[in-house]
Image (cartoon, rainbow, N blue to C red):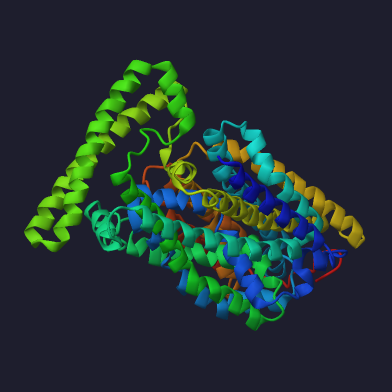
C-alpha cells in the first residue's frame, strides 16, 4: 500500500488516542470514570451508541455479506425501530431513574444477589467473546493481506484503544466515538461514490445486473425457523435481539446512563431508530456494487491472499488449471452481464432471457471458486472464509490513492470505537457487579479506579485470545450476532420478569437457567433453529418458567441492600 495511505491511517490512530487521553479529566471518581458524571449531551451519546454497534465487523463483514448475498441482511434490523420505541417508555426511564452503574444492579434490588451475579456473568461471557470477534475482523484480514503477524495486527488497534479506555473512561470513549463515526460515514459515502464512477455502466444498469443475480432483494416474506434473513425473523427475532442488546447489554445501557436526563437518553436511542437501517443499507450497497464491479474487472480466484499464496506454492499446476477455467468463466459472465445491462431498453422477454443466461454464467464462476476454496481448505488446514476478505482486497487493489487509507482508517476507527466501549462496559460490570459486590464492598474511589483499569487490561487480553478463534467461523457479522443471540434472549427474559409484579426471585433464577438450557438445545441439539430465533426462545422460556416457578413459591421478601455504598 502507498505511503500516503499509511500516513492517513497512522495520523488518524495517533489523533484519536491522544485526544482520548486528553479527555481523562473528570475521571478521578468512579461516577466520572464509568458514567461521565451523567453529563453528556444526547447527540454525543447517540453517536456513541451507533459507533459501538458499527464496528469493523460491519465495515468488513457486512460489506462482504452484501457482495455474496445481497441486501437480504438488512431485514436483520427491521425490529430495531420497534425495540427503540418500547425501550424509550420502559427500561430507559426505569434504569436511568434508578441511578445505577450497571443494569444488573437493579436485578438485585428486584430479585436477589444470585440472579444479579448470574446475569452479569452471562453478559461478561457474551460481550467478552463479541469483543474478540470485533478485534478479529480487521486483525485477521490485515494479517492475511499485508503478511504481518496476527499479534502485531491486534496490537496496532488494541494497544492505543486499551490505553485511552483505561485512562479516560467512558468520557474518552464517547468523544472518540463521535469522531470515529464522522470518519466512518465519510468513508462509506466515498466508497459508494467511487464505485458508481468506476463501474462502466449507469447506476440503473448496475442495479439491474445486481437484481438479475438476486443481490437487491431486500424482502423475504417466507416464514422459516431455519432461514436467518426473512422479514419475520427480522421483525420478531430482531425485535427481541434489539430489546436485549439496547435494553440489557451493559455496553449499550452504559451509553444512555451517561445522558443528562431521561429525555436525552431517549433521544440518543432514537438516532439509531432513524438512521441505523439506512446506514446498514448503504453499507450492504457497497458490497452489492463491488459484486457488480467484478463483473467487468476480473476478481481474484481466492480473495484471501495468504491462502492464495499457499495453494499456488503447494499445487502450482492445479491452481494454474483452475485459474484458466476461472478466466474463461469470467469472460462468459462479463458478456452475459453486458447483455443484462443492454436488455433494460428492450422487451421484458429479452430481459428475462438475459437474466437467466447471466445467472447460469454466474453459477459457473461460483462453481470454480468453490473448487478453489475446497483446495485452499485442504492445503492450509484452515476453513477458507473468503467473505471477510472481499472488501479489504478491493480497497487495497482498486481504490485511488488516499481513499484506501481513508477506508482502512475507517475500519480501524470502527474497531477501536466498539472495542473501547465494550472494554469499558466489561470493566464496569466486573468491578461493580463482582468486585465491589463480593470482594471489597468498601474502598476509596482511587482503589476502584485502579481495579477498573486492571479489569480493562484483562478483558483486552481475553478479546485477543478469542480473536484468533473467531476468524475461522465464517462471516464475522454473523459470528458476533450468533455469540450475542446465544445469551441475549435469556438475559432479556430476566428483565421482563422484573417488570412483572408477580415474579419471584427463585423463578427469575430458575427461569434464567432454563432459558440458557433451551437456547443451548436449539443451538446444538436436533432442531437447527436460526440464531435470530434464539432470542425469542430464550426470552419466552425465562418468562414462562419464571412465572410457573413463582406460582409455587412464597411471596418474595424485600431484597436487602447490597453491602457497601449504594448508588
Tell me the quadrant of the picture where the C terminus can be found: bottom right
**Is any part of residue 228 visible from this angle?**
no
Q: Is residue 132 above or below residue 212?
A: above
Q: Is residue 301 above or below residue 8?
A: above
Which residue is at the front of the view, 446 or 117?
A: 446
Q: Position of residue 246 (x, y in %)?
A: 57, 66
- Which residue corresponds to the image point at 59% horizontal and 46% vertical from the top-left? 5
- Which residue corresponds to the image point at 60% horizontal and 66% vertical from the top-left? 49
Q: Position of residue 508 (x, y in %)?
A: 60, 63
Q: Residue furthest bottom?
A: 263
Q: Say left or right for 416 vs 228.
A: right
Tell me the quadrant of the picture where the N terminus can be found: top right
Which residue is at the front of the view, 397 or 99?
A: 397
Which residue is at the front of the view, 278 or 450?
A: 278
Q: Position of residue 46 (x, y in %)?
A: 61, 71
- Which residue corresponds to the image point at 30% horizontal and 53% vertical from the top-left? 200
Q: Say left or right for 140 vs 309.
A: right
Q: How many marks?
A: 0
Q: Position of residue 170 (x, y in %)?
A: 74, 63
Q: Is residue 396 above or below residue 354?
A: above
Q: Is residue 368 above or below residue 223?
A: above
Amino acid at each position: 500500500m502507498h505511503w500516503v495511505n499509511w500516513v492517513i491511517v497512522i495520523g488518524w490512530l495517533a489523533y484519536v488516542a491522544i485526544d482520548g487521553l486528553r479527555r481523562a479529566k473528570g475521571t478521578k471518581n468512579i461516577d466520572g470514570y464509568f458514567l461521565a458524571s451523567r453529563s453528556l449531551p444526547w447527540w454525543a451519546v447517540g453517536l456513541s451508541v451507533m459507533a459501538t454497534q458499527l464496528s469493523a465487523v460491519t465495515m468488513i463483514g457486512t460489506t462482504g455479506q452484501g457482495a455474496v448475498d445481497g441486501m437480504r441482511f438488512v431485514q436483520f434490523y427491521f425490529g430495531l425501530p420497534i425495540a427503540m420505541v418500547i425501550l424509550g417508555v420502559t427500561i430507559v426511564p426505569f434504569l436511568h431513574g434508578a441511578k445505577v452503574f450497571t443494569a444488573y444492579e437493579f436485578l438485585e434490588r428486584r430479585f436477589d444477589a444470585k440472579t444479579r451475579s448470574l446475569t452479569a456473568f452471562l453478559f461478561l461471557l457474551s460481550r467478552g467473546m463479541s469483543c474478540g470477534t470485533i478485534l478479529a475482523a480487521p486483525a485477521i484480514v490485515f494479517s492475511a493481506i499485508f503478511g504481518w503477524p496476527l499479534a502485531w495486527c491486534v496490537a496496532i488497534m488494541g494497544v492505543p484503544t486499551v490505553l485511552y479506555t483505561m485512562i479516560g473512561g467512558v468520557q474518552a470513549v464517547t468523544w472518540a466515538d463521535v469522531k470515529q463515526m464522522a470518519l466512518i460515514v465519510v468513508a462509506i459515502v466515498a466508497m459508494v461514490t467511487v464505485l458508481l464512477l468506476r463501474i462502466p455502466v449507469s447506476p440503473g444498469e448496475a442495479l439491474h445486473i445486481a437484481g438479475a443475480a438476486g443481490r437487491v432483494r431486500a424482502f423475504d416474506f417466507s416464514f422459516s425457523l431455519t432461514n436467518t434473513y426473512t422479514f419475520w425473523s427480522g421483525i420478531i427475532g430482531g425485535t427481541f435481539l434489539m430489546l436485549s442488546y439496547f435494553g440489557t447489554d451493559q455496553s449499550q445501557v452504559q451509553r444512555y446512563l451517561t445522558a443528562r436526563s431521561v429525555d436525552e437518553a431517549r433521544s440518543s436511542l432514537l438516532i439509531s431508530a432513524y438512521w441505523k437501517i439506512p446506514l446498514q443499507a448503504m453499507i450492504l450497497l457497497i458490497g452489492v456494487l463491488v459484486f457488480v464491479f467484478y463483473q467487468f474487472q476480473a476478481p481474484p480466484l481466492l480473495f484471501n491472499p495468504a491462502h492464495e499464496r499457499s495453494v499456488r506454492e503447494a499445487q502450482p499446476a492445479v491452481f494454474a488449471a483452475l485459474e484458466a477455467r476461472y478466466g474463461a468463466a469470467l469472460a462468459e459472465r462479463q458478456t452475459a452481464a453486458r447483455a443484462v445491462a443492454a436488455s433494460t431498453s428492450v422487451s421484458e422477454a429479452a430481459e428475462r432471457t438475459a437474466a437467466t443466461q447471466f445467472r447460469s454464467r454466474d453459477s459457473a464462476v461460483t462453481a470454480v471458486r468453490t473448487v478453489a476454496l475446497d483446495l485452499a481448505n485442504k492445503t492450509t488446514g484452515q476453513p477458507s472464509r473468503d467473505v471477510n476478505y472481499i472488501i479489504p482486497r478491493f480497497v487495497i487493489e482498486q481504490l485511488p490513492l488516499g481513499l484506501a487509507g481513508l477506508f482502512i482508517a475507517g475500519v480501524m476507527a470502527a474497531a477501536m470505537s466498539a472495542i473501547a466501549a465494550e472494554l469499558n462496559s466489561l470493566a464496569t460490570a466486573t468491578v461493580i457487579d463482582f468486585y465491589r459486590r463480593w470482594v471489597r464492598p468498601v474502598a476509596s474511589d482511587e482503589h476502584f479506579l485502579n481495579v477498573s483499569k486492571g479489569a480493562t487490561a484483562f478483558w483486552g487480553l481475553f478479546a485477543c485470545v478469542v480473536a484468533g478463534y473467531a476468524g475461522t467461523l465464517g462471516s464475522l457479522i454473523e459470528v458476533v450476532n450468533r455469540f450475542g443471540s446465544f445469551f441475549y434472549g435469556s438475559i432479556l427474559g430476566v428483565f421482563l420478569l422484573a417488570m412483572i409484579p408477580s415474579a419471584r426471585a427463585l423463578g427469575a433464577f430458575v427461569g434464567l437457567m432454563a432459558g440458557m438450557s433451551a437456547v443451548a438445545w436449539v443451538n446444538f441439539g436436533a432442531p437447527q433453529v436460526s440464531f435470530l430465533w434464539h432470542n425469542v426462545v430464550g426470552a419466552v422460556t425465562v418468562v414462562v418458567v419464571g412465572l410457573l416457578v413463582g406460582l409455587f413459591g412464597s411471596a418474595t421478601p424485600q431484597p436487602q441492600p447490597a453491602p457497601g455504598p449504594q448508588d
